[in-house]
Image (cartoon, rainbow, N blue to C red):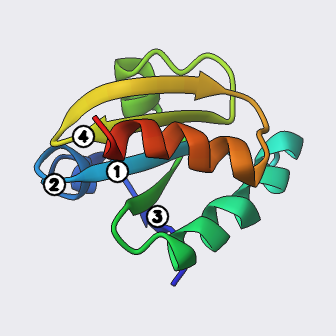
Amino acid sequence: MAAKDITNDTFQQEVLDYKGVVLVDFHAHWCGPCKVTGPIIDELSESMKDIKFVKVDVDTNQELAGKYSIFSIPTFLILKDGVVKNQFVGAHSKENFEEEIQKMTNS
Protein backbone atom coordinates (compact mmCIF):
# COMPACT_ATOMS: atom_id res chain seq x y z
CA MET A 1 0.00 0.00 0.00
CA ALA A 2 1.34 3.43 -0.94
CA ALA A 3 1.97 6.11 1.65
CA LYS A 4 -1.30 7.67 2.76
CA ASP A 5 -2.16 11.24 1.77
CA ILE A 6 -3.16 13.27 4.81
CA THR A 7 -4.36 16.84 5.40
CA ASN A 8 -4.46 19.57 8.03
CA ASP A 9 -7.63 17.91 9.34
CA THR A 10 -6.17 14.40 9.72
CA PHE A 11 -2.58 15.23 10.77
CA GLN A 12 -3.30 15.12 14.52
CA GLN A 13 -4.92 11.69 14.37
CA GLU A 14 -2.65 10.13 11.74
CA VAL A 15 0.70 11.49 12.97
CA LEU A 16 0.73 13.21 16.36
CA ASP A 17 -1.51 10.69 18.14
CA TYR A 18 0.18 7.67 16.54
CA LYS A 19 2.28 5.48 18.85
CA GLY A 20 5.35 4.46 16.88
CA VAL A 21 7.50 5.85 14.07
CA VAL A 22 5.99 7.95 11.27
CA LEU A 23 7.77 9.38 8.23
CA VAL A 24 6.00 12.44 6.83
CA ASP A 25 6.77 13.46 3.24
CA PHE A 26 5.99 17.16 2.62
CA HIS A 27 5.78 17.44 -1.17
CA ALA A 28 4.08 19.11 -4.14
CA HIS A 29 2.91 17.55 -7.38
CA TRP A 30 4.93 19.99 -9.52
CA CYS A 31 8.22 19.41 -7.64
CA GLY A 32 10.88 17.49 -9.59
CA PRO A 33 12.78 16.03 -6.61
CA CYS A 34 9.41 15.07 -5.05
CA LYS A 35 8.61 13.03 -8.16
CA VAL A 36 11.88 11.16 -7.63
CA THR A 37 11.38 10.46 -3.93
CA GLY A 38 7.64 9.72 -4.04
CA PRO A 39 8.04 6.20 -5.49
CA ILE A 40 10.85 5.47 -3.00
CA ILE A 41 8.56 6.40 -0.09
CA ASP A 42 5.80 4.20 -1.53
CA GLU A 43 8.25 1.31 -1.92
CA LEU A 44 9.48 1.71 1.66
CA SER A 45 5.89 1.77 2.91
CA GLU A 46 5.49 -1.69 1.35
CA SER A 47 8.67 -3.16 2.81
CA MET A 48 8.83 -1.47 6.24
CA LYS A 49 5.50 -2.52 7.71
CA ASP A 50 6.35 -1.39 11.25
CA ILE A 51 6.75 2.25 10.10
CA LYS A 52 3.87 4.49 9.08
CA PHE A 53 4.41 6.56 5.91
CA VAL A 54 2.25 9.58 5.08
CA LYS A 55 2.37 12.38 2.52
CA VAL A 56 1.33 16.01 2.89
CA ASP A 57 0.78 18.18 -0.20
CA VAL A 58 2.16 21.60 0.80
CA ASP A 59 0.01 23.44 -1.76
CA THR A 60 -3.24 22.24 -0.22
CA ASN A 61 -2.00 22.09 3.38
CA GLN A 62 -0.14 25.38 3.80
CA GLU A 63 -1.06 25.58 7.51
CA LEU A 64 0.90 22.38 8.24
CA ALA A 65 3.80 23.46 6.06
CA GLY A 66 3.99 26.71 8.01
CA LYS A 67 3.69 25.02 11.40
CA TYR A 68 6.68 22.78 10.64
CA SER A 69 8.70 25.52 8.86
CA ILE A 70 8.73 23.74 5.52
CA PHE A 71 10.62 26.12 3.22
CA SER A 72 12.01 23.63 0.70
CA ILE A 73 10.49 20.47 -0.68
CA PRO A 74 10.63 17.63 -0.41
CA THR A 75 11.08 17.84 3.36
CA PHE A 76 10.82 14.73 5.49
CA LEU A 77 9.97 14.57 9.17
CA ILE A 78 10.44 11.45 11.24
CA LEU A 79 8.34 11.39 14.39
CA LYS A 80 8.34 8.88 17.20
CA ASP A 81 5.26 8.79 19.42
CA GLY A 82 4.15 12.18 18.08
CA VAL A 83 7.48 13.97 18.63
CA VAL A 84 9.66 15.19 15.74
CA LYS A 85 13.00 13.40 16.03
CA ASN A 86 14.55 14.20 12.66
CA GLN A 87 14.04 16.48 9.67
CA PHE A 88 15.86 16.45 6.35
CA VAL A 89 15.39 18.07 2.97
CA GLY A 90 15.87 17.04 -0.64
CA ALA A 91 15.99 13.91 -2.73
CA HIS A 92 17.66 10.96 -1.03
CA SER A 93 18.37 7.37 -1.96
CA LYS A 94 16.32 4.48 -0.65
CA GLU A 95 19.31 3.45 1.45
CA ASN A 96 19.58 6.90 3.02
CA PHE A 97 15.88 6.84 3.98
CA GLU A 98 16.37 3.40 5.51
CA GLU A 99 19.36 4.65 7.54
CA GLU A 100 17.43 7.66 8.87
CA ILE A 101 14.44 5.51 9.82
CA GLN A 102 16.66 2.90 11.50
CA LYS A 103 18.07 5.63 13.75
CA MET A 104 14.57 6.14 15.14
CA THR A 105 13.68 2.50 15.52
CA ASN A 106 16.92 1.81 17.36
CA SER A 107 16.53 4.71 19.80
Q: Which mark is residue 80?
A: 4
Residue 4 in view in this figure: yes
**Residue at position x 58%, y 42% in the image:** 99
Q: Horizontal placement of 75 versus 96: left or right? A: left
> Are the two marked residues, 2 and 1, in contact with CB atoms closer than 8 angstroms?
yes
> Which comes sooner in the sequence, label 4 or label 1?
1
> Are the two marked residues, 3 and 1, in contact with CB atoms closer than 8 angstroms?
no
- Residue type, mark 4 in image: Lys
- Residue type, mark 1 in image: Val
Whole-percent x and y of residue 101?
Answer: 47, 45
Disc 1 target residue: 22
* Element carrying mark 2: loop
> Which comes sooner in the sequence, label 4 or label 2?
2
- What is the crowding at mark 3: few (fewer than 14 residues within 10 Å), some, or many (at least 20)? some
- Separation (CA) of disc 4 from disc 2: 8 Å
- Residue type, mark 3 in image: Asp
- Separation (CA) of disc 2 from disc 3: 15 Å
**Front-most of 39 and 51?**
51
Quadrant in the rendering for residue 49: bottom left
* Element carrying mark 1: strand
Disc 2 target residue: 18
| Front tag of 4 and 2 | 4
Q: Horizontal placement of 34 versus 27: left or right? A: right
* Element carrying mark 3: strand
> Are the two marked residues, 4 and 1, in contact with CB atoms closer than 8 angstroms?
yes
Whole-percent x and y of residue 55?
Answer: 50, 55
Quadrant in the rendering for residue 38: bottom right
**Residue at position x 43%, y 36% in the image:** 103
